[in-house]
Image (spheres, rainbow, N blue to C red):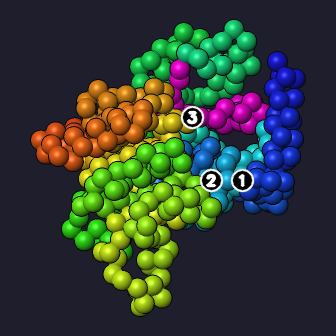
């Protein structure tokens, strides 16, 4: 099985290398790993995140470790360019790297360099050689905000190697009872239900949001519909609301912000109704163009603002539900926004629970979107109830960070 795993890792690397000739993310994935050199530390604390979403999810634990142990060296690794490129200069770490390809040689060299006294992995990502090397050196690995489902390879008859990887983990902090039971069924008892650290992150963000003057000016007393982390399928649907709701303002924060994709989105909107964020914040625009209030739609053409944008909204549409799965609903719910999303949400515990509370609403087409938007816009009692349920739900699920910190600080 290990031979198959190693072969699979090599084939994946070759596939990414081929893709790098025509795909920017793949090129960053390859080039970033080729150029990095590791700083050697006597000791460190290692945090790994698959991507930006997992970074935000694990950030409360990272921040608390940094606060409690300011003199400890902290090393962060990312698997994906979307995490590394945005957070490579974070002040929460002494060094930020791409995670090297999971080979025995790479694992030994990386761990020799950073010498971690422990490793914290958030939610996903189980790498055989890195976990094995930590285990051989008797250095603990913690999984935080873990989530497990019956269909995962760990619980299949052919998943023996992946079950062995789980055996290298010292402790699992999982999100729910079903995840704990799945682990218990394969003989893993070093597990506790701590909840999801994302709740702590988004609640803290809602309590202390970052003020954005330009958004205030754009809003100008209007109610705002925010479409966050959207893909083209989502944008086509939400764009249909713009002409219907002329007294509302709309903010789109696309998941991909290439000029081509943003121009395509603008082309779906009423003529001259939309403006890009980079335009409205430029001095030249303010000096020679109409005020921000003249525009009905704002397109966010940067990464990193979305979590702060929700404070300005009344309703949110969360993208991804017509693809692999929806993006973060909790950032919007923490601000008391009812959330709408596409049909592919079954794997997301919080989305299912928001639907049950009637604070989240799944739609399958334009007519369903218009129906629920009309209900939320025109039925004040319905909207207020959904809003309160969303915020109450998030607040009630905070506290995972404190539970995790209580245990892992015994290792530091």
Do the residues bearing badges 1 and 2 touch, measured as CB atoms within 8 Å?
yes
Of pointers 3 and 1, the one earlier in the residue sequence: 1
User: Which residue is denoted by mark 1 in the rendering?
Assistant: 25
Q: Quadrant of residue 216?
A: bottom left
Q: Residue furthest bottom?
A: 287
* Vertical side of 283 occupied by 58: above or below: above
User: Would you say 286 lies left or right of 163 here?
Assistant: left
Report the label total.
3
Q: Could you tell me which secondary element the residue under label 2 belongs to?
A: helix
- Spatial CA span between label 2 and label 3: 17 Å
* Vertical side of 383 occupied by 1: above or below: above
Of pointers 2 and 3, the one earlier in the residue sequence: 2
Q: Position of residue 139 (x, y in %)?
A: 66, 37
Q: Is residue 52 visible?
A: yes
Of pointers 1 and 2, the one earlier in the residue sequence: 1
- Spatial CA span between label 1 and label 2: 8 Å
Q: Position of residue 250 (x, y in %)?
A: 35, 59
Q: Quadrant of the N terminus?
A: top right
Given residues 76 and 212, the one toward you in this image is 212
- Which label is found at residue 324? 3
Mark 3, residues whose alpha carbon is within 10 Å: few (<14), some, or many (≥20)? few
Highlighted magenta segment, given as a residue range? 123-149
| Residue name at image x 47 percent, y 70 percent | 276
Nearest to viewer (mark 1 / mark 2): 1
Membership of 131 in magenta stretch: yes
* Vertical side of 125 occupied by 79: above or below: below
Q: Is residue 394 visible?
A: no
- Which label is found at residue 178? none
User: Which residue is denoted by mark 2 in the rendering?
Assistant: 82
């Amino acid at each position: 099985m290990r031979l198959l795993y190693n072969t699979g890792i090599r084939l994946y690397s070759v596939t990414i290398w081929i893709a790098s000739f025509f795909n920017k993310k793949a090129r960053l994935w390859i080039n970033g790993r080729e150029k990095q050199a590791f700083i050697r530390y006597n000791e460190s604390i290692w945090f790994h995140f698959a991507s930006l979403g997992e970074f935000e999810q694990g950030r409360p634990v990272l921040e608390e470790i940094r606060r409690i142990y300011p003199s400890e060296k902290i090393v962060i690794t990312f698997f994906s360019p979307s995490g590394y490129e945005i957070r490579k200069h974070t002040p929460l770490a002494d060094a930020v790297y791409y995670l090297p390809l999971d080979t025995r040689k790479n694992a030994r060299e990386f761990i020799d360099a950073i010498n971690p006294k422990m490793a914290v992995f958030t939610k996903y990502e189980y790498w055989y050689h890195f976990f094995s090397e930590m285990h051989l050196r008797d250095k603990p690995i913690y999984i935080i905000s873990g989530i497990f489902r019956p269909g995962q390879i760990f619980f299949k008859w052919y998943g023996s190697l992946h079950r062995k990887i789980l055996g290298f983990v010292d402790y699992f902090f999982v999100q729910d009872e079903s995840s704990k039971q799945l682990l218990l069924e394969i003989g893993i008892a070093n597990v506790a239900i701590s909840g999801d650290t994302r709740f702590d992150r988004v609640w803290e963000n809602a309590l202390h949001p970052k003020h954005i003057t330009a958004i205030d000016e754009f809003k100008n007393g209007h109610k705002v519909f925010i479409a966050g982390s959207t893909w083209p399928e989502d944008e086509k649907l939400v764009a249909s609301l713009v002409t219907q709701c002329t007294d509302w303002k709309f903010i789109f924060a696309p998941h991909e912000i290439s000029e081509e994709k943003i121009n395509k989105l603008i082309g779906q909107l009423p003529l001259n109704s939309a403006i890009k964020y980079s335009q409205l914040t430029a001095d030249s625009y303010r000096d020679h163009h109409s005020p921000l209030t003249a525009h009905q739609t704002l397109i966010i053409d940067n990464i990193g603002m979305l979590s702060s944008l929700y404070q300005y909204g009344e309703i949110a549409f969360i993208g991804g539900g017509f693809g692999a799965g929806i993006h973060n609903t909790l950032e919007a719910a923490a601000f008391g926004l009812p959330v709408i999303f596409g049909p592919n949400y079954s794997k997301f515990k919080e989305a299912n629970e928001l639907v049950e509370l009637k604070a989240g609403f799944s739609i399958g087409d334009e007519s369903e979107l218009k129906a629920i938007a009309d209900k939320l816009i025109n039925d004040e009692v319905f909207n207020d109830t959904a809003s309160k349920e969303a915020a109450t739900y998030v607040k009630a699920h905070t506290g995972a960070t404190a539970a995790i910190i209580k245990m892992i600080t015994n290792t530091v």
